[in-house]
Amino acid sequence: MSFLDSQFQHLVPYVPGEQTRTKVIKLNTNENPYDPPQNVIEAAKEAAKTLSRYSDPTCLQVIQPLAKHFNVAPENIFLGNGSDEVLFFLFQGFMEKGVQFPDITYGFYEVYSDLFHLKTEIISLKEDLSIDLAEYTGEATVIIANPNAPTGLMIAPEVICTFAKNNPQRLIIVDEAYSDFSEASLVPYLEAHPNILVVGTFSKSRHLAGARLGYAVGSKQLIEDLNKLKFSHNPYSVNAMTLACGEASLQAQDYVDECTQKIIATRNWTQQELQKLGFETTNSQTNFVFCQHPTVAGETIFKQLKEKNILVRWFNNPRIANYLRISIGTPEEMATLIQAIKEIEGVDI
Ligand SMILES: *Cc1c(COP(=O)(O)O)cnc(C)c1O
């Protein structure tokens, strides 16, 4: 017998990629393949000594340097327990006129819109898997991931700005989980477009998936409103060790940038190698590739790689059922992946 309220009985929760402690090549959840910088590890150790106290609810030790990094004021930054928590507050409190997002995108958008019983309009990507904002009519809040996941494709900031300008009464949320691996961010355009909110994370380019640190950048009003929800929920959702790690990560910008450049180079190499094997790949602007083979099914490749202890992501969704999303690992891991794919019957044609 379930004691869960009937309004939640129907929920289909988000299915995270598999986490494992066994020795595998893990290319299934878009984590950073490189360890956090040494100063982050030291900062976590130091912060552990303070754990008898509550964490600082102002989060200024991260907000101030992050504001500096983005060239905005601290009042323009909100921090949450992973960007998933930031998204949770956005779906909870900013979507009473409904929400629109693409059919192929980050799975949590649909989970949260269900959780909060939102009026939801799911809009199909175009045939080439791109997003056409002209189809996002009406007054609902719009949320897109840019670059989008799992397609890896991005819309130019100017296109989003024009859309925001033409829809001044609507909130446009841009999830930039992968923007550090792309050529552009919306952050420099926020002052001119107060109805755009950028959401970001320390999980991908900043090596801190396990620490859970996400943020929003936007107008003072939007940030104040987000804090209203956070302080009605859990003012300490970002814990003291995570705050220390986030601060240290911003002090290690050179290391972060160096790893990002390596990942971009490895992504481009991986795409070329896959293309040599006949794969079609999207023009990914992220730390993963999205690809399909003309004759061997995505599910087959996924399963055979798993037998070889290489985890990639396959989505059981008819529209992208033939695709694989492969996170970028180290050059050695990706060479092993390519070799393993070559050994799958029918791939190397
Ligand atoms: C990974 C990811 C997130 C979640 O990031 P966390 O900060 O780890 O919660 C959000 N949006 C997109 C598009 C992602 O790929």
Image: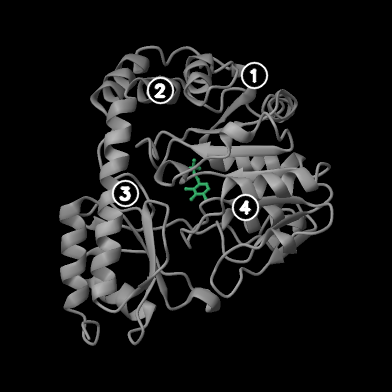
Rounded to the nearest whole Å, what is the CA distance between mark 2 and mark 1? 23 Å
Q: Amino acid at mark 3?
A: Ile
Rounded to the nearest whole Å, what is the CA distance between mark 4 and mark 3? 22 Å
* Place of residue 16 in the rendered image (x, y in percent of width and height, measured from the top left): 46, 56
Q: Quadrant of residue 224?
A: top right
Per the image, label 4 sits on a secondary structure element best described as strand
Q: Nearer the viewer, mark 2 or mark 1?
A: 1
Sequence-wise, the earlier of marks 4 and 1 is: 1
- Tell me the residue that label 3 is attached to: 264
Placement of 121 over or under 42, stated as above or below: below
Rounded to the nearest whole Å, what is the CA distance between mark 3 and mark 2? 29 Å
Per the image, label 1 sits on a secondary structure element best described as helix
Q: Nearer the viewer, residue 51 or 310?
A: 310
Per the image, label 2 sits on a secondary structure element best described as helix
Q: Is residue 345 left or right of residue 163?
A: left
Q: Amino acid at mark 2?
A: Met
* Residue at 35% in and 53% down: 19
Q: Amino acid at mark 1?
A: Glu
- Tell me the residue that label 4 is attached to: 144
- Tell me the residue that label 2 is attached to: 241
